[in-house]
Structures are given as C-alpha cells and as structure tokens.
C-alpha cells in the first residue's frame, strides 16, 4: 500500500496551534466541577502525557527519513503538535502539584512501562504508539462529541482538553500510516497479529494504570476504599461513561480493514475552531522535527 492509496483524507491539514493555557491564574484543586473522581481521571491522564508523548515523537520520527513526502510532512505536523501538548500538560501538571497533588507515582509508572519497550525493535515502538494514538483519538472524539464530559469544568482547563482533542483527531492517522509504510513488506497476518497483540497489552496497561492512578489521586483527596472505586467506576463506565462509550471504536481496531480515517470526524473540529485557534495573535510555531 502506498501513501497515495491510504484512507487519510488528501486535504487533511495537521496544524500545530501554539496555545498556552492557565498561565495567568492558579487552577482550582478540584477543577472538574468540584468532583474528586472527575478531576482524578483527567489529572491521571495528564500525568502520562509529557512522558508518553515524547515517546510517541521519538518512535515515529525514526521512520520519517525515506517516507513518502506526504507522510513525512504529516510526521512533522504530528511531532510538532505532540511537543506542544507535552509542554502544556507539563504546565498543567505543575498547576496540579501547586494545588497539592503528588503526581510522581503516576509519572514513575509511565516511565516503567515505556522502559520495557526500550530494547525492542523500533517498529514495536511504532505499534505501541499507534495503539495509544487510537486511544487518544477515540477519547478525543468522545470528548468533543459529548459536552457532558467536561460539564462543570473550569473554563480554561476545559479549553486545554478540547484543544488537545482537536489536534489528536487531526493527527490520528499519522502513527498508523507510518506503521503501514514501515511494514509494507510484511505478510498481512503478521501485521495484524503484531498490531492486535500490542493493542491488547497497551489496553490492559492503560486500564490498570489509569484506574490505579486515579485511585491514588482520590486517596490524596481523602476518598478511599469502596467509595472511591464506586465513584470512579460509575464515572468511567456509566455516567458520563467515557470508557463504555469508546468501547465500540476500540474494538474496530481489530478489523482487518481498520484505518483511523475510516471514520472522518473532522466535523467535530469545526465546532471548536475558535477554542483551538484562540484569540492570541498567530505566532510562528517552531517545528519540532
Ligand atoms: Fe497529544
Ligand atoms: Fe497524539
């Protein structure tokens, strides 16, 4: 399969938006509507981004050289967007620390998980990246499609999450297309097997680690035991039920004809164009790659 036959839209634009959030005022500790469990899961996700996204950038960038020009250009857009996301979530995590949370245990866990892949062939890192990028893309889709997820959240922090979601949708096919290009000589079944195996592993770790991370942050708010479990599981799986709502999209990853752009959800970006571009004067974004 060549880059020209991929389902990635020909007119797709991956536009890094160099936005800054929350620099002018402290973020309230329970910024998500005063809710311990809602704040905890978003904070737990944010704790993973600076380390995780740097890993995505490193994994995909290795395959840029020699890639078809369109893919090489998309990789450039992807790595630049992720570098800015890391910067903004790093700043957000510092504000969470200022509000009294200790994220160090959560960050350490991410580093430990990623260390496992360190000595594996570079293509394994691309497989892990594309699995996690599918996760971020379907979470982003759900976040933008259903305003309930950020209902009650502090305005600027909600904007940070929507801005991130917009760019995750824009670049959702890049790691996947990099994988398709890098494994173009592999037999179909081997491709599917590695992709599916890595996704299952990534999913297990994602669910276990984000749940543990959220419970740890809830513990820091004094909520523990059965009460913590029931608040968190209800929030994730019932109402608003983010994890339940992405289950179908998650499953589609295992279809032999799967591609992130089989679902063109760019209509979601339009509604948030203003948030995503901001009111700041456009500055030239230094390319990260
Ligand atoms: Fe990102
Ligand atoms: Fe991403």
Image (spheres, rainbow, N blue to C red):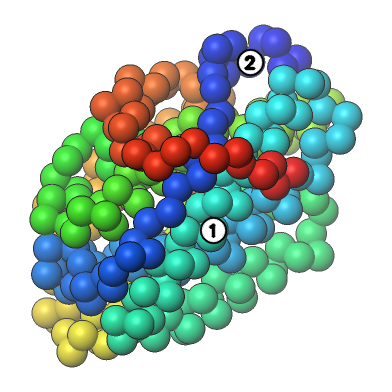
* Vertical relation: 94 (above or below) 136: below
Q: Is residue 69 left or right of residue 204?
A: right
As helix, strand or loop, the secondary structure at mark 1 comes to: helix
For disc 1, the marked residue is 86
Badge 1 crowding class, 10 Å Cα cut-off, few under 14, some 14 to 19, many 20 or more, is many
Task: Name the residue: 47% across, 84% down.
Answer: 105
Image coordinates of residue 266 in percent, x first then y, are 39, 22
Q: Nearer the viewer, residue 190 or 185?
A: 185
Q: Is residue 180 visible?
A: no
Mark sitting earlier along the chain (1/2): 2
Q: Quadrant of the C terminus?
A: top right
* Vertical relation: 69 (above or below) 131: above
Badge 2 crowding class, 10 Å Cα cut-off, few under 14, some 14 to 19, many 20 or more, is some
Q: Is residue 273 left or right of residue 31?
A: right
Task: Name the residue: 24% across, 33% down.
Answer: 145
Q: Nearer the viewer, mark 1 or mark 2?
A: 1
Image coordinates of residue 138 in percent, x first then y, are 38, 39
Q: Nearer the viewer, residue 94 or 177?
A: 94
Query: Which label is found at residue 6?
Result: 2
* Vertical relation: 211 (above or below) 250: below
Image coordinates of residue 172 in percent, x first then y, are 52, 34
**Is the CB of the residue bearing disc 2 within 8 angstroms of ligand 2?**
no
In the image as oriented, which residue stretches furthest toward the front?
281
Q: Quadrant of the N terminus?
A: top right
Q: CA distance from mark 1 to mark 2?
A: 28 Å
Task: Name the residue: 28% across, 69% down.
Answer: 25
**Is the CB of the residue bearing disc 1 within 8 angstroms of ligand 1?**
yes
């Amino acid at each position: 399969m060549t880059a020209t036959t991929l389902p990635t839209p020909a007119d797709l634009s991956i536009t890094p938006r160099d936005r800054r959030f929350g620099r002018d005022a402290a973020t309230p500790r329970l910024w998500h509507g005063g809710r311990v469990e809602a704040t905890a899961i978003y904070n737990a996700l944010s704790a993973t981004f600076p380390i995780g996204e740097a890993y995505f950038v490193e994994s995909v960038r290795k395959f840029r050289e020699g890639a078809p020009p369109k893919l090489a250009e998309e990789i450039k857009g992807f790595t630049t967007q992720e570098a800015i996301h890391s910067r903004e979530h790093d700043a957000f995590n510092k504000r969470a620390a200022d509000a009294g949370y200790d994220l160090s245990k959560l960050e350490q866990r991410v580093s430990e998980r990623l260390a496992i892949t360190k000595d594996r062939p570079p293509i394994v890192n691309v497989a892990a990246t594309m699995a996690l990028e599918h996760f971020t893309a379907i979470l982003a889709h759900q976040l933008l499609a259903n305003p309930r997820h950020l209902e009650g959240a502090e305005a600027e922090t909600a904007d940070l999450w929507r801005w991130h979601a917009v760019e995750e949708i824009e670049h959702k096919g890049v790691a996947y297309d990099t994988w398709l290009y890098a494994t173009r000589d592999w037999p179909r079944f081997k491709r599917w097997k590695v992709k599916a195996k890595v996704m299952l592993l990534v999913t297990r770790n994602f669910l276990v680690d984000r749940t543990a991370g959220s419970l740890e942050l809830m513990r820091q708010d004094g909520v523990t035991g059965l009460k913590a479990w029931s608040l968190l599981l209800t929030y994730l799986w019932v109402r608003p039920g983010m994890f339940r709502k992405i289950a179908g999209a998650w499953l589609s990853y295992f279809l032999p004809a799967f591609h992130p752009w089989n679902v063109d959800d760019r209509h979601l970006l339009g509604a948030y164009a203003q948030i995503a571009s901001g009111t700041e004067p456009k500055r030239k974004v230094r390319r990260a790659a």
